[in-house]
Image (cartoon, coloured by chain):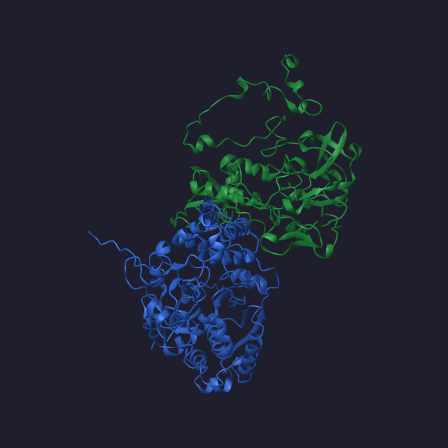
Amino acid sequence: MSDQLLKVTIDNITVEVPNGTTILQAARKIGGDVTPPAMCFYTPLKGSGGKCRTCLVEVSKGSEKDPRPMPKLVASCRTTVMDGMEIKSITSQRVLDARAGVVEFLLLNHPLDCPICDQAGECHLQDLSYEHGKNGTRYEFQRRTFKKRDLGQYIQLHMTRCILCYRCVFTADQVSEKRVHGVLDRGDHAEIATYIEQNLNNEFIGNVIDVCPVGALTDKTFRFKNRVWFTKPMTAHRDCDKCCGEVTLWMRGDEVFRVTARKDEWGEIKTSEKTGKTGWICNDCRFDKKKASDWTIEGLAPIDRHSVIGQGKYKGLKKPEETIQKVLDGRKPRLLMDIHSVSEVNNPAIELSEINGPATSAVFKKNNHE
Amino acid sequence: MGRKLLLEKAHVEGIRYYDVYRREGGYRSVEKALKSMTPDEVTEEVKKSGLRGRGGAGFPTGMKWSFLAKPEGVPRYLVVNADESEPGTFKDRYLMEFIPHILIEGIITSSYALGANSAYIYIRGEYAWIPDILEQAIAEAKNNGWLGKNILGTGYNLEVYVQRGGGAYICGEETALIESLEGKRGNPRIKPPFPAVKGLWDCPTVVNNVETIAAVVPIINNGGDDYAKIGVGRSTGTKLMSACGNINKPGVYEIDMTISVEEFIFSDEYCGGIANGKRLKACIPGGSSVPILPANLLLKTAKGEQRMMHYEGLSDGGFATGSMMGSGGFIVLDEDQCIVKHTYTLARFYRHESCGQCSPCREGTGWMEKILWRLENGQGKLSDIDLLVDIQSKIEGNTICPLGDAAAWPVAAAIRHFRDEFEWHVNNPKECLQRNYGLAHYADPIHVPTPA
C-alpha cells in the first residue's frame, strides 16, 4: 500500500503521487495557477505550515472509498491526499473568496512600505497580493506598530512587516543550535522578538533571512544598498568547513551585493546537488564573503516563477507549465490585447540578462538591436 | 421539580470533604466499575447513556472514547478540561469548588475505561483557590485507597495531577490545552492528527470537560439506560446551566432538559424572572460564542412552538433563527442593555484572546473590534454593518481552531437579529451616547406563516 501511487485530481488535472504527499505538494507537481500560494509552509522545516491560511482549498470528494466532500476548506499544506481525492483550487469561488479574504487580513496591518523595503521584488506577500488580492483596502484604522528590537549586527527586524508565519522560529529551532528568539505575546500584538534583548549570534542564524517570506527579516549588510531587480543572481561556491558553500551571489557588474542560499522555484532552500548536504549556509558565507574573488562563479542562476527579477527575461528561465487551458477543459483564455503590438518596452526579443546593468529606455530603442 | 444527578447532594453540609461524600454514597461507581466491569463495558455504558460533551460542542462522549487509539506499550492519558473561560460559563467552578470528589470519582472511572494510568486536571489560572481544594480531595482519595497503586486490589494504578493554566481562553481548546500542559506556548495544533491518536506527549489522549467526567458517575451508578431516560431525544441526562445577567436569581442550576426556556427564565425554581421588573430583550443561551437571540425568538421558535431547553430545542432553526446549547452559560439581557455595546465587549474579548497563529483570526478579530468600537461611540457608517458581516464570513471556518468561529458567530447573530439597533447607532450618533435603543420590537410576537 505504501509504495502505491495515489490518484488525485486538482482542478480537473489528475496526477499520481506517493502516499503521504500533501495536497500542496501534489499541486506543485502540476505547477502553474492551480498551485495554492503558501506563505508559512516551508518543506525543509518540520512542523511548519497551517498558519497563514492562504493555501486553503476545497475538497469536493474525500477519496474513492469515502466520497463525501469535506465541509470546511482545508489547509492544503497540512492535508495529505487520499486515493481518488478531488480538489478545487482556482475553480472554486469559495476558495477564491477565502483566499482574497486572507490576503486582505495579511495586508491589514502591513505598512505597505515596499518602496523602501529591501525585500521588494522578491517578496512573497507582494506576489500574493498581486495574484490573489483585491485592489484597495477597507481598513480605516491606524496600522499597528511595535517597539524596535535589535537582533544584532547582521539581521534587521521590521516587525511591522511580519506576517507571523513562524518560519524563522522553526529555522532557529532546527538549523541553529540554540534558539533565543521566538514569538512573544499573542493575538494581533504577537511579535517576533528575542527574549530579554538577546542578540542572535549563532553561526547559522542568517538563514532566517532566507526563509522570511516578507521584509521582516533582512540582511543588514545589504540594507539599502541596491534593489534586488538591479542585481544579477549568479550561482557560486567556495570551500567552507561549516556549510555546503553553495550559494547565490547577487551581483552588479563585478560587485557582490548580497549572498543568499540557493532556492528552488517555490522559494525554498535547495539541497546541494553535489554533496547532498542541506542548503543552509553559514553566517561567514552570507555576511563576510562579499568579494567576487572569494567565490568560484558558476554562471547565471535559474530564476523561476516569482519575483520581478524573472519577468520572463532571463536566459534559461524555468517557466511553470501553463495550466489554464487544462483547467478550462481545453478552451483558450481570450486575449484582450497583445501589449507588444502597441509598445516596444518589454520587447520579448531582448534578453535582459545579457545587457550590462539595469535596463533603461535606451535598451528598447529600435535601432539599438536592428 | 426536575431530576438532579450532579447537584443532588450539593447542599449536604461538608460534602466537599471525603468522609461526608463517601457517607452520602460517593465512590460507588469506582467500586462497581473496577470490581464488576471491564473497561469496554464502562465505555459501552457511557455510549448507551447518550452523554454528550458538556464543554460546548456536544460531541457524544462514548464515541469520543471509542476513537482513542490503543497501540501496545504506549501510555494513554485522560485530560480534564477545567479551563472554563467562556464568558458567562461558571458551572465547572461550582462543581469543583463544592463537590470536588464527584470529579475525582468520575476521573477514576473514566481513566479505568480508557486504560489511562495518569490523568490531568488542567484548571484555568484565575481559579486560584480551586487547585488547593482539588489537591486536598486527591490526597483524601489517595489516603483512602481510591488512587495510587493497585486500587481496591484490582491491580489498576492511577495518579491524578492538577495543573494550573496561565489564564488564556485559548487553552480551553483541547490541542492548545495539551500544548500548554506540555509546558509550551498555548497554540492550538493543526489537526489531524487528533488528540485521540497523538495528544499529550504524542500519546493517545482524551480531553473531556469537568461536567462530562462528573456525569460518568451517575451513569455507572444507575446504568446508561437510566441516564438516557432523562431528557428528550438525543439530549439525554441533566445539564448544568450557569445563569447570569439581568435575572433575579443568577447561579448554577441543574436542568433535566425537559423544561422550556420561558420556564427556565421566569419560574422561581430557576432564574426567577428579569430583575428590577424590567422586560426581557435578548439572551445568549450557551456562553458568549453562541448566537444571541432576541426575546421573541428565544421563547418561541420560528415555527411558533415553545423553545425547549435542550440541545435540539436551542438550535432549532439553525443559525438563522436559533442558537446553541454550547457550554450552558446562560446570559440574559434586559430592555436597558445595548446590543452594540454588548457585541463590542465580546469582540474585544476575542481579540484579546486570539492566539495570533492564523491570519484570519489574528487580524479579523482586531478589525471587528475597532469597527464595533466606532459604531458604539456614534462614529460608525452604515457600510460598517455589512463590512462586519463580510469580515466574520471570512473568518468563520477558515481558522485552525474554533476560536475564529466563536469570534465570528456573536457578531453575525447580533447583526442578523438587531440590525436596526446598529443602524440606529449610525443614524443617531449623539443620541446613542445618551441612551440605549431599548426593547423596541424585539419581544413582539413573531409572524408564523400558516401553510396554505
Position of residue B101 measured from the top left corner of the image (x, y, whole percent): 49, 79
In the picture as drawn, the residue positioned furthest to the left comes out as B452
Residue B73 location, quadrant: bottom right
Does residue A276 sit above or below B287 in this rendering? above
Position of residue A207 measured from the top left corner of the image (x, y, whole percent): 69, 45
- In which quadrant will I find the N terminus of chain B? bottom left
Would you say residue B363 is visible in this rendering?
A: yes
Q: Count the marks: how many?
A: 0
Identify the residue shown where x is 77% and y is 46%. Answer: A153
Identify the residue shown where x is 59% and y is 40%. Answer: A125
In the displayed structure, does residue A85 sit left or right of residue A256? left
In the displayed structure, does residue B225 sit left or right of residue B328? left
Residue B2 location, quadrant: bottom left
Would you say residue B402 is visible in this rendering?
A: no
The chain assigned the colour green in the figure is: A
Position of residue B11 measured from the top left corner of the image (x, y, whole percent): 44, 82
Q: Nearer the viewer, residue B254 or B135?
A: B254
Position of residue B194 measured from the top left corner of the image (x, y, whole percent): 49, 58
Display colour for chain B: blue
Residue A9 location, quadrant: top left
Q: Nearer the viewer, residue A59 or A220?
A: A220
Q: Nearer the viewer, residue A148 or B8?
A: A148
